[in-house]
Image (cartoon, rainbow, N blue to C red):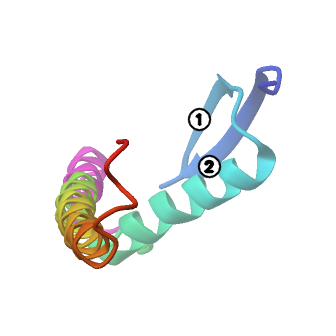
Amino acid sequence: MSEPERLVKFNLLGQHFAFYTAASEEEMERILALVKEQVESIGGDKSGGTIPVSKIAVMACLNLASSYLRLQSEHEQYRRSTAAKLEEINEKLDFALPGENEGR
């Protein structure tokens, strides 16, 4: 059962944001911490900085998208590797137990 939507408010780069979400409080805390970490790594933690807020936001989005795509690729490689290992194990079992698998 999903949680009911609730209003989440937060401040980032001196601007206030609010939106509705069904994400849990813990999940939202993790999401907002990740976004703030990305923004701060670009230089968004400096008050009166020289980088416009819009550029900081775009760079944070690009960093997060890059991380997401890298993890997606790593997951796919892991999935293929695991499938290949399982196939190898199944072949070894078929060879080791020749009469056991005839009914399959």
Residue 81 against residue 83 in the figure, above or below = below
Near-viewer residue (37 or 1)? 1
Query: Residue 5's image quarter?
Result: top right
Q: Is residue 62 left or right of residue 30?
A: left
Q: Which residue is mark 1?
A: 17
Q: Residue at x 23, y 73 (%)?
A: 85
10 Å neighbourhood of mark 1: few (<14), some, or many (≥20)?
Answer: few
Image: magenta residue range: 48-64
Q: Residue at x 71, y 27 (%)?
A: 22
Give residue 50's position: percent from left, percent from top.
Answer: 23, 66
Give residue 19's position: percent from left, percent from top.
Answer: 63, 25
Near-viewer residue (72 or 88)? 88
Give residue 100's position: percent from left, percent from top.
Answer: 40, 60
Residue 23 against residue 95 in the figure, above or below = above
Q: Which residue is mark 2?
A: 11
Based on the picture, tell me whether residue 25 belongs to the magenta stretch.
Answer: no
Circles 2, 1 touching at the beta carbon (< 8 Å): yes
